Amino acid sequence: MVVMGRIVAPYGIKGWVKIQPFTEALDGLFDYEHWWLADKGGWREGEVEDAKVHGSVLVAKFVGCEGRDGAFALKGKEIAVSRDEMPEAEEGEYYWSDLIGLNVRNLQQVDLGKVKDVFETGANDVLVVRGERERLIPFGGQVVQEVDLAKGAILVDWDADF
């Protein structure tokens, strides 16, 4: 499962919820037929009755979610889609979820740690790498030399003292 958003609040009194999407495009979740909701350490399919963009969030109505109390019960739950439903990434492009957990080494073969998170700055994406300390490493062509998903490794041109 790939987490694509989180339910942040009820919306109205008829069981609708507000969703903060984690997708590049605000309406990116609409590309997927099946939405899964985090549920007691697992996932259950959440059948979407209706959904739309509302300002900077999405609002959705799930089948079986009735009234404000039902919507409150969903608050805080993550929304995911199956990795199998996602299209293959283009050559040289990666889903952030595929990068998390990869080992990062520099050209001098110093182990810098594992990717714990990725975020966007506007100029480029940034890897949050945690080893003996946390490093923020730009995910760009001059810094990232190689990404090998099969080996679970990223090779970077980055000084260990940075």
Image (tube, grey):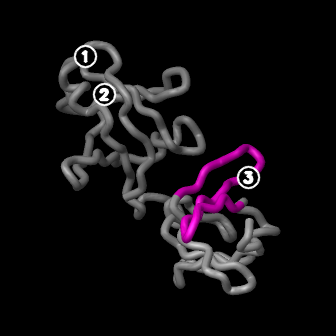
Mark 3 or 2: the one toward you: 3
- Residue kind at label 3, given as amino acid type: Asn
Whether tag 1 and tag 2 are in contact, CB under 8 A, the answer is yes
Quadrant occupied by the N terminus: bottom left
Q: Which residue is mark 2?
A: 61
- Residue kind at label 2, given as amino acid type: Lys
Residue at image position (40%, 26%) is 59
Question: For the residue labelled by badge 2, is the local secondary structure a helix, a strand or a loop?
Answer: strand
Query: How far across and how far down the image is residue 129, in percent?
Result: 58, 64
Residue at image position (46%, 34%) is 20
Q: Which residue is mark 1?
A: 14
| Sequence-earlier tag: 3 or 1 | 1
**Separation of disc 1 and disc 2 at Cα?**
8 Å
User: Would residue 128 appear left or right of 34 to someone viewing this image?
Assistant: right
Give the camera-side residue of 123 and 54.
Answer: 123
Give the camera-side residue of 157 and 12.
Answer: 157
Q: Which residues are magenta?
A: 117-137
Residue at image position (59%, 61%) is 134
Whether tag 3 and tag 1 are in contact, CB under 8 A, the answer is no
Whether residue 88 appears in this view of the structure is: no
Whether tag 3 and tag 2 are in contact, CB under 8 A, the answer is no
Q: From this viewpoint, which residue is outermost toward the top?
A: 13
